[in-house]
Image (tube, grey):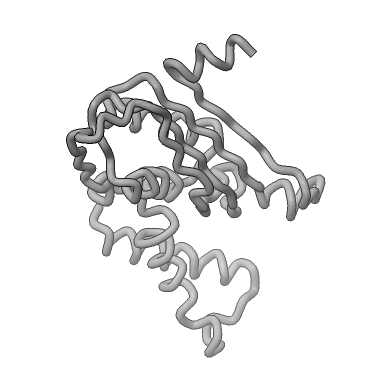
Amino acid sequence: MSDLEKKEKISDLFAQIMDVMGLDLTDDSLRGTPNRVAKMYIEGIFSGLNPANKHKIALFENKYQYNQMLVEKNITFYSNCEHHFVPIIGQAHIAFVSSGKVIGLSKLNRIVQYYVKRPQVQERLTNQIAMELKAILNTEDIAVIIDAKHLCVASRGVKDDTSATVTTYYGGVFKKTTQNC
């Protein structure tokens, strides 16, 4: 199904949901909402479901022979809980040791942004980012830490808006180091 067809179908279905909830779709403020939601889903918050939106990642020679850990931290992201379709807001932290190639730093952010733009659970997200980095960088020496707030916890159920969830992936030298702690 094309993106246009998906948007049309989502718009129709969302209009039905709004109607069931008793919202007046002739109201000036609500009239375009089904189309806006459909566009937001397909072109925005769930665009990571379309493989065509995955960025091409180029690597460069490590001319400086830098062989220590590189950390890109505080990569802010917004995702959506696949159980309730409400936001997950967090930060990803990535570390790796080069296998002889260098990646553009913004590409690390793009990898995170691709995987957060789909309905998610944090554990899977952590592993998806790690597996993508392992494949691209050709190294086991990868660490991914995600620290996030889940609005499904904050706005419903227990309504705890102070807790956060931390998930980790440690591979290669990072796994060996954490096992010795």
Q: In this image, 92 relative to 22: left or right?
A: left
Q: Percent x, y for residue 137?
A: 28, 29
Q: In this image, 91 relative to 115: left or right?
A: right
Return the residue nearer the eye: 142 or 151.
142
Q: Residue furthest front?
A: 64
Q: Residue furthest bottom?
A: 28
What residue is shown at x 51% (from left), y 40% (from top)? 93
Q: Percent x, y for residue 38?
A: 41, 65
Q: In this image, 152 relative to 124: left or right?
A: right
Vertical comparison of 22 with 117: above or below: below
Return the residue nearer the eye: 75 or 29.
75
What residue is shown at x 23% (from left), y 42% (from top)? 57
What residue is shown at x 64% (from left), y 73% (from top)? 22
Quadrant in which residue 58 is drawn: top left
What residue is shown at x 41% (from left), y 67% (from top)? 11
Q: Percent x, y for residue 176?
A: 51, 12
Q: Quadrant of the C terminus?
A: top right
Quadrant in which residue 102 is drawn: top left
